[in-house]
Image (cartoon, helix red, strand yellow):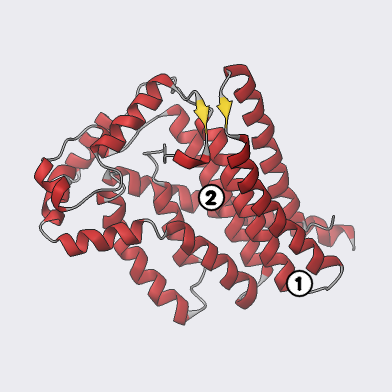
Amino acid sequence: MLFLPAERSILMIIATLMVLGCILIVTKGVGVDIAGYAGLLAIGVSALALGQYYRRFRPDARISATLTATGLFLVFSMAGSIFNYMLLPVRFPPIDATLSRIDAALGFDWPSFVIWISGYPLFGDLLRVVYFSSLPQLVLVILILGFFVDIPTLHRFLLTGIFGALLSILCWSLFPSFGASSVHSLPQAVLNTMPIAVGPAYGAELVRLGQEGVNYLTPRNVLGLIGFPSFHTVMACMSVCFVTRLRLVFWPLLAVNLVMVPAILVQGGHHLSDVLGGVAIFCLANLLASSLLRQKNAAAVAMFA
């Protein structure tokens, strides 16, 4: 196997998460949909294998790096989700009430904002589409960086996402929260007018999982557990900030992700504080990724000096 230094670091992170996840699954006696996860793993491993093919037998640096990055992204997403679920039930009291008070101090009231948006049903539907575009956007950016920018930027993008996810999980495990939808109710008329992806029922299920944990793990009904910080915000920042050199791509993605902010608040059922926390996590993750890559580059230069 021929993996670049950044790719090896990501593989080590994935392997660590998988080992920890398996240990927690066994110790907690949680059932697992093996077939479901095997299918997801097979897709990621297939992308990695194709990346190796284009690195060893039909050398093409861009194709191999892009395929490898796609495979790493898919496998990490699965491993990270499993590990996140295995931290249930939460061990500390949720901080959603505190986040609501912070929002109030900032002049933001979630129920009032959602009710106002519901007066524009078509815009509410647009927010739903935008909210679910986060993962496709990341895949698109991986392809763009791999084929049209450069491999170091692609690796920094991947590492930023991985560090962002790990920091979000760490923050959530110490200060759990499940979003504004878990502590606020909405009039049924609003829900009838504008279905919300992460509405009160979804929020109630998150609270239940936080209290009781999970008995059976399957990719068929995975929920986004983390309220604060908003990982959707991390992904939105990633989609925009890594394509600034490509103006034809940057401006459309910027427009979409400006709309992502109200989408996260309304369709994602998040506090405004969650969004602000997500921006902070992105900045920290990007710094960590840049620092790690600089260290690896320096080590490589020293090795061949």
Q: Is residue 44 left or right of residue 285?
A: right
Q: Is residue 278 left or right of residue 70?
A: left
Vertical placement of residue 256 versus 127, above or below:
below
Residue at 79%, 57% (x, y): give it.
Answer: 3
The three-letter code of the residue at mark 2 reads: Ala
In which quadrant of the rendered view does residue 154 lie? bottom right
In which quadrant of the rendered view does residue 187 lie? top left
Residue 139 is situated, as x and y percent measured from the top left of the image, at 54, 63
Vertical placement of residue 267 versus 246, above or below:
above
Q: Disc 2 designates what residue?
A: 285
Residue 253 is situated, as x and y percent measured from the top left of the image, at 41, 70
Residue at 9%, 45% (x, y): give it.
Answer: 189
Spatial distance from mark 1 to mark 2, Cα to Cα?
Answer: 26 Å
Q: Disc 1 designates what residue?
A: 61
Q: Secondary structure at mark 2?
A: helix
Residue at 64%, 21% (x, y): give it.
Answer: 26
